[in-house]
Amino acid sequence: MRYFLFERKREKRKGPRQTLALFSDRNGIITGSAQGIGEATARLFVTRGIRNLVLTDRNGDRGRAVARELEGAGCRTHFVEADLAEVDACRRIVAEAEAAFGGIHVLVNAAGLTTRGSIFDATVEVFDRLMAINARAPMLLMQACIENMIEHRIEGAIVNVVSITAHGGPPKLCPYSMSKAALAALTRNAAYAVMPHRIRVNGLMLGWADTPTEDLIQQAEHPAGAGWRAAAEASLPFGRLIQPDEAARAIAWLASSESGMMTGTLIDFDQSVLGAGDVSRPSMTADR
């Protein structure tokens, strides 16, 4: 108790906490930045002093609106409208970042699709698009950014937003889980390959998050419709879904010097502990 009281007094003497300026001399690229976790990450990076930022999303109108807001907040911002399923679009994003700002210090692969499909009904078209956006696009963006970092001798950081479903996932997310498992493997493989260049690559294995895309899907598929969120939160240990801003803080930590030399790490950010508790058992009600 004495120690606790001492710590409280010491904290009080320190005064208000200073805003972290961890990205003040850096240039970054964030995909999927028109909404959800990508947008939250972009906004947080700006509050933490990032110098230049390239935003990219297929939603051009919303993406440009976010870019204008961040520009007004003091960050030089460049928006690239792009569909990450297109190979040339991935390469164009990095090329425009180089043309606008030169060296790239941070890449955050936050874009992703969560289209449903099980082993019983997943189509080739769904599989191909999920793999293209969730796995191939991050690889292409990483290739180009790593080349830029090496050329400019930048000890850069790459953060991939993976998914807890990469460990297996529920039946309805079969191709999605496969694509995120591929991204998890890519994260560790690339981290080992670029370690001699002091480039760090880490992944955030994110659980169920409260994003605009998830809201649309759930309203369309959930029996509760617009009330899906309340039902979902009531079933979770912490009584809520993961919020984009808290995911953004974890991403910022991985992308900054605060995480030190950490690389090749996949962090489970979910309301579960794999391997603990009851063994997972499928419902005996057929999904097909």
Image: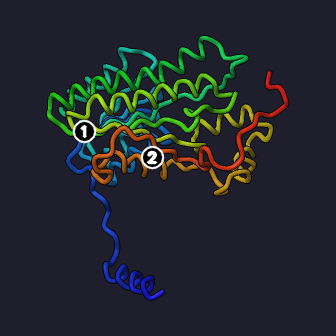
The image quarter containing residue 178 is: top right
First-in-chain label (2 vs 1): 2
Spatial CA span between label 2 and label 1: 21 Å
Horizontal relation, residue 233 to residue 79: left or right: right
Q: Residue at x 30, y 67 (%)?
A: 18
Number of numbered tags placed on the structure image = 2
Above or below 11: residue 233:
above
Horizontal relation, residue 148 to residue 178: left or right: left
Q: Residue at x 69, y 28 (%)?
A: 171
Percent across and percent down for residue 32 are: 45, 33
Q: Give the labeled residue for mark 1.
A: 156
Quadrant position of the C terminus in the picture: top right
Q: Give the labeled residue for mark 2.
A: 40
Label 2 residue SS: helix
* Residue 265 seen from this side: yes
Identify residue type, mark 1: Gly
Residue 226: which disc?
none
Horizontal relation, residue 268 to residue 202: left or right: right
Percent across and percent down for residue 260 are: 28, 50
Percent across and percent down for residue 227 are: 75, 46
Query: Nearest the camera: 39 or 168?
Result: 168
The image quarter containing residue 97 is: top left
Q: Residue at x 72, y 46 (%)?
A: 278
Percent across and percent down for residue 89 are: 37, 18
